């Protein structure tokens, strides 16, 4: 008699864990199963353990597209690190971002996309925002953005700033998060 009751309670508990796990995988964006309600950054009280975040600069700047491949956690749960790759369409102009070549010569009949040197981005997630810095041989860039699609969250704009090796500002302004595939949220 007690075995069916225990089994029913265990199934209910496991079912709620499964539903929570479905939501955990998208705490930073997307929609949670089974009811597909939107996930918003304020639901995430932790930092992602891995994944990819893609973001780009917005006009007034020449668009630069960055991809942050999260592959390392720091000692604190809010610390992240990973490879940062960037590319730009030189048809729009030469980006004012460190480590991009002054000219781009793609093969004939191809788009004029050029890439900068991959670098290591170190970041911290705090109050639903990623605040990070990347160093290049000829300068550095800093980023401050919400882990949510778009250009802002809760009225705070997503921003970046790039400086040369002496600290002079090369470019700064708004950025937009377009790719958000993070997983393994840990508190």
Image (cartoon, rainbow, N blue to C red):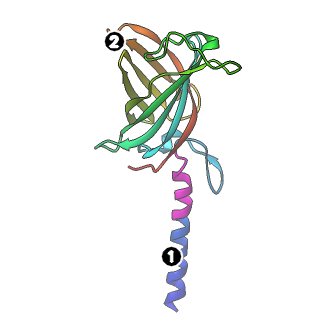
Q: Quadrant of residue 15?
A: bottom right
Q: Please give the residue where the numbered disc 2 appears in the rendered image.
A: 165
Q: Please give the residue where the numbered disc 1 appears in the rendered image.
A: 10
Question: Magenta-highlighted stretch: main secondary structure?
Answer: helix
| 105, above or below 72, in the image | above
Q: Residue furthest right?
A: 109
Tag 2 near tag 1, CB within 8 Å: no
SS at mark 1 in the image: helix
Q: Quadrant of residue 138?
A: top left
Closer to the camera in the image, 141 or 105: 105
- Region in magenta: 17-27
For marks 2 and 1 on the same chain, the one whose residue lies earlier in the sequence: 1
| 131, above or below 114, in the image | below
**Left-right relation of 52 to 134:** right
Question: Where residue 38 sits: x, y (%)?
Answer: 62, 44
Q: Nearer the viewer, mark 2 or mark 1?
A: 2
Whole-angstrom CA distance, mark 2 to mark 1, is 59 Å
Within-10-Å neighbours for mark 2: few <14, some 14–19, many 20+: some
What residue is shown at x 33% (from left), y 12% (from top)?
165
Could you tell me how many numbered marks the image carries? 2
Within-10-Å neighbours for mark 1: few <14, some 14–19, many 20+: few
What residue is shown at x 44% (from left), y 40% (from top)?
70
Question: Where residue 118 sits: x, y (%)?
Answer: 44, 28
Q: Which mark is residue 70?
A: none
SS at mark 2 in the image: loop
Does 151 lie within the magenta span? no
What residue is shown at x 50% (from left), y 10% (from top)?
102
Question: Where residue 139 sits: x, y (%)?
Answer: 37, 15
**Left-right relation of 45 to 18:** left
Does 26 lie within the magenta span? yes
Closer to the camera in the image, 40 or 74: 74
Closer to the camera in the image, 36 or 53: 53
């Amino acid at each position: 008699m007690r075995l069916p009751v225990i089994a029913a309670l265990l199934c209910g508990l496991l079912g709620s864990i499964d539903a929570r796990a479905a939501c955990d995988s998208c705490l930073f964006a997307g929609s949670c199963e089974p009811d597909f309600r939107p996930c918003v950054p304020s639901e995430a009280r932790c930092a992602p353990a891995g994944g990819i975040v893609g973001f780009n600069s917005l006009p007034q700047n020449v668009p630069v597209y960055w991809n942050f491949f999260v592959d390392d956690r720091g000692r604190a749960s809010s610390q992240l690190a990973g490879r940062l790759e960037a590319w730009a369409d030189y048809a729009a102009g030469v980006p004012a971002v460190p480590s991009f070549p002054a000219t781009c010569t793609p093969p004939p009949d191809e788009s004029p996309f050029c890439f900068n040197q991959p670098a290591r981005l170190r970041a911290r997630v705090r109050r639903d925002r990623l605040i990070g810095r990347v160093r290049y041989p000829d300068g550095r860039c800093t980023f401050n953005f919400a882990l949510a699609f778009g250009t802002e969250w809760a009225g705070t704009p997503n921003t970046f700033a790039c400086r040369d090796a002496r600290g002079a500002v090369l470019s700064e302004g708004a950025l937009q998060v377009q790719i958000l595939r993070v997983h393994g949220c840990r508190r």
